[in-house]
Amino acid sequence: MQDFGDAFALAGQLLVSFDPDLREIVGLSLRVSVTSVLIACLLGFPLGALIAVGRFPGRGLLHVFVSAMMGLPPVVVGLMVYLMLSNAGPLGSLQWLYSPAAMMIAQTVLITPIIAALTAQVVADLNREYHALFQSLCVPAHRRVAALLWDARFSLLTVALAGFGRAVAEVGAVMIVGGNIANLTRVMTTAIALETAKGELGLALALGMVLMLIAFAINAVLMVTRARAVERAYV
Amino acid sequence: MQQRCKVLAWITVIWGLTSAMAVAENSAPSIVLQSTTSTANSGLYEHLLPQFYTETGIRVHVVAVGTGQAIKNAQNGDGDVLLVHAQSAEEAFVEAGYGVARFDVMYNDFVIVGPADDPAGVTGLADPVAALQKIADTGSVFASRGDDSGTHKKERSLWWATRAQPDAASGRWYRETGSGMGATLNVAVGMGAYTLTDRATWISFKNKGEHVIHVEGTQALFNQYGVILVNPERHARVKAAEGQAFVDWIVSDRGQQAIADYRLDGQQLFFPNATVK
């Protein structure tokens, strides 16, 4: 198990030296995953809230569908997005294949169901408290959704973080649509897969540790921000 | 509230800047090269492509996958140039009109690697077919790529020449990993299996464990790489001029010399043998 020792030393070295290649890879990972989370939130929050409070035919089916989509394998998402963006596919003219844009699309498809399904749960719980109030004040549906989403904002931050975790950790989708091209579409997870394939297990593990550290830092910052905001909101 | 808005504004500004920088970077002319893991993982392209870039100003984005997948991607028009190692599949690709023409670029060879204690007793055998037969007869574990890559095609053609029936033993001594060369080597080292690999990947592979080369150096293990420009008549978005420049360069004296110059641990990994100049 010499690899573990090597990996710790290497991870430290990589962080201290602030290697330019590593910086680029980390930067792209964050750019792709954060953008995907932002888009997925824009789509998933309203969709989830609609499922939670809406009264329309097919609502139950939609809920089951969105929940089931949480289990989508990244490779399948990657393959679907590849077939869409391929020059032989319907969206080939965009020329987005093997670009960060393609990776963002794949990750957005992957995590929007997660965000929507979790949002539906959060909003449904809150709606039970607010329902009588909304009824008595005759609040229209779109105002209800807006009010519920705003009041659930702290819980929704956790929902967004769950989406971010899934996005930044997946490798199957970005490998297919990004192509793991050096200096263009190589992100943390595809770099780890590449180093593993080269037999550089220590370096692969070190990159994994760096990824963990970044995820840890982001979660910590957002949790602290959230705690402060909650304090201010309720004094 | 005000403070939060400020933070949000800063995040947006930084986001915009990094995105804009990324866009500016991509303005140079570029092509997509569909290629194999053996050439990419061995570091050959890190050696060749900077030189090609200085001479032509064209960036090459390498997508490294198995030969089967590379050919499929190129058929879909998702690449400008194809550089792989499965001559009959390459010729079929050109014949079907997906490629303009195929040129030999370079060669190296395949080797059979396995655990140092050699349970099948194949060390030093001159004939790889006989070696595989012995592996089958002794029921020694063999890790196959199982992914329709160039190496996998080669392995299958060697098995066909034996009396053994590896497919009937799939899951027992014949284990198909369905993954790339590096992943398969990791598996082979992990379970003490024999496997067929190209020499470049083996030399550059860093997790060899107790594994060594047992069979090498015969004509039957020859490994030829070819280059093909994807047919722009088939896919209008193929960057024909830039792609042709790459094909011309890699078969030219300068490109061939650059291939010959690439060494890892003092060993030459690829041997140029283009016939057109």
Image (cartoon, coloured by chain):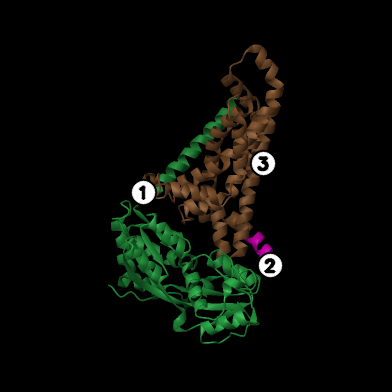
Chain colours: A brown, B green
Residue B61 is at least partly visible in this image? no
Which residue type does callout 1 highlight? Ser
State how far apart marks 1 and 3 are (Cα). 37 Å
State which region is magenta. A1-10
Helix, strand or loop: magenta stretch: helix
User: Secondary structure beneath disc 1?
Assistant: loop
Against A95, residue B160 (above or below) is below
Residue B165 in the image: x percent, y percent?
57, 76
Q: Which residue is mark 3?
A: A220
- Look at the image and say whether residue A161 sits in the magenta stretch: no
- Residue B246 x/y as whole percent: 33, 63
Among the 4 quarters of the image, the one containing residue B21: top left
Quarter residue A139 falls in: top right
Closer to the camera in the image, B250 or A224: B250
**What residue is shown at x 39% (from left), y 71% (from top)?**
B87
Q: Which residue is mark 2?
A: A2
Q: Amino acid at mark 3?
A: Ala
Q: Chain of mark 3?
A: A
Q: Residue furthest top?
A: A137
Looking at the rendered structure, whether the residues under marks 1 and 3 are on a common chain is answered as: no
Residue marked by disc 1 = B27
Tell me the residue at 60%/54% (across/down). Answer: A15
Quick one: quadrant of the N terminus of chain A?
A: bottom right
Asked where in the image residue B6 lies, by quadrant, the reply is: top right
